[in-house]
Amino acid sequence: MNTQLTSLTKIRRKVTFSLAQTGVFLLVIGMLMPVIYMLIMSFKTSAEIAESPLGLPSQLYLGNYIKTLESMNYISSVMNSLGITLSVTVLVAFLGALAAYPLARKTGRFSRWFIMLVALGLATPSFVNITPVYVIFRELGLLDTYLGIIIVFTALNLPFAVFFYTGFIAAIPRELDEAAMLDNCSEWQIFWHVIRPLLRPATATLSLFVMLMVWNDFIYPLLLLTDKSKFTVMIEVYRFVGNRNIEPDMLFPAAVLGSLPLLALFVVFQKRILAGVTAGAVK
Amino acid sequence: MKIKSIYLFTLPALLVMLIFYLYPIALSFKMSFTDFTGVGIANDVGWKNYDRIFSRQRYLDAIQITFTFSFIVVIIQNLIGLFFAALLFKMPTIRNFCRAALFTPSMMSFVIVGYVWQFIYSPYNGGLNSLLGSIGLESLQHTWLGDPSTALFAITATHIWMFVGYSCAIFLAGFANIPADIQEAGRLDGASAWQRFRYLELPLLAPSITINIVLSTIGTLKTFELPFIMTGGGPVGSTRTLSLEIMQNLFGQYKFGFAGALSIVMLIVIIFIVFFLNRFLKNKEDNL
């Protein structure tokens, strides 16, 4: 009797749990609806959008995409974003790791000040440095150049990179440095031959964040780039959609095309990206 | 004095920090006391720019709108994120999928999210009104972004939607850090689910609460892109945040001096709030 009762409660608990689980799952799908909506809308004809705003498309209509790709400089803006991302990643990784090495190893007053400076950099909103950067770049002729935008993005990503690498290097045992020191390695040699190879996984994660930032940032390229051929993806999307007074048959394909590379990246590198996001959160 | 050569490694990064952070902040500060317009001579105007910010309703409104936006987002985004994390933590089968699904919007750019939601809120065939219509709630249909009383909340909802997954991921990492034997002990002592959450899990989640609140506060106080894309600050200035005001002064009217004053005010506000928030939350962490 008693065992029957406990097995009944067990079953009831199981049912309640799977009901709750289904509920949570549906809620999450509900949260994803705007993304699904964006995808569905991009395949609907203008007539379908007008007649059944929430309905599914009757067929996989690609006309919107063809029209959008014809009038948007999609491929060239993707190339620009990729090229800028690659250059910025190399620069940020090198400068960030180089600065992080002493900060992780020496905890003197200098290191504490430097970390404070980096924290200030992390909290500074773009608007504070945007005017001075604009003025300096105008003097130096860096407005509307790839070099200028690469320098700016490097500077914007650097505080995060220094933070990120400092934590990572601090976890590398000092014994490795000391062993190399006994072999008469210089500090540079230790950094380059001992530390740097160990930073590969950190650099891989960092590069994803740089990619995310370069891809999605909007303010700096909006102000610094005026030449159409140099536009990054987001500026291209902004100019393209903004000039059309949101015609949905062009808006949604442009939105999908603009997000696609990053969403693909997320699907492939999900674990790494989520680990990077939460790395600082739990000590 | 002998400087250890290892510190030379920080030199390039130090230069970047000086040129792109410290110097610009100093220059903004200097410009904020002038009527500089980007070209020509800057005349010294003393505290006039700051005086203007704190005496005109327009700028006080911008500050208030920024705070309202920030406050609502920080509270609701983190509550929803915590809600999902607390449930998903106990549901390993669907946990990873749901965490990734919730996180997806924060991988998208503000520009795209802004445009997509602008259409969702649109009175002409927009997703939200169509949805309300199809479930018989026509009475709730609304020009969401066109009405000054709802525009700010509509943008707030979009921002929350975008970053709930971010909060949730951080909270989940916090949950994963709670030792299994603590959970077990709670269960054996016959604590209810709520009691376990309140007295066992919540105190151990404190560091992730701090991180989440600080990150979302910084992120929302400088919010610019969503109002810029979705409403341009309107209708009648109801979504004109501080950063939108700065950008309009800067690149609409070339009032570099005044924009400098606004950005200095903003920087001080952010540093001040983040500093005290951090200190307050760290204190709380010990007392939870």
Image: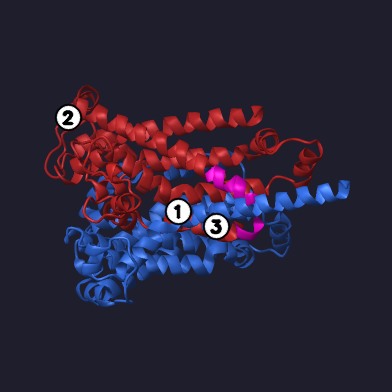
Chain colours: A blue, B red
Label 3 to label 2: alpha-carbon separation: 56 Å
Q: Chain of mark 1?
A: A
Residue B84 lies in magenta, yes or no? Answer: yes
Label 2 to label 1: alpha-carbon separation: 52 Å
Q: Quadrant of the C terminus of chain B?
A: top right
Q: Are marks 3 and 1 on the same chain?
A: no
Position of residue B174 measured from the top left corner of the image (x, y, whole percent): 63, 46
Does residue B247 sit above or below A185 in this rendering? above
Q: Which tag is nearer the camera, tag 3 or tag 2?
A: 3
Instruction: Write the residue at 42% across / 63% down.
Output: A211
Q: Quadrant of the N terminus of chain B?
A: top right
Instruction: Write the residue at 45% across / 41% down.
Output: B216
User: What residue is shown with label 2?
Assistant: B44
Give the residue type at disc 3. Answer: Cys
User: What residue is shown with label 3?
Assistant: B98
Does residue B101 sit above or below B185 in this rendering? below
Position of residue A123 measured from the top left corner of the image (x, y, whole percent): 43, 41
Classify residue A257 by image quadrant.
Answer: bottom left
Q: Which tag is nearer the camera, tag 2 or tag 1?
A: 1
**In the figure, is residue A225 to the left or right of B17?**
left
**Magenta span:** B81-94
User: What residue is shown with label 1?
Assistant: A31
Label 1: few (<14), some or many (≥20) within 10 Å? some
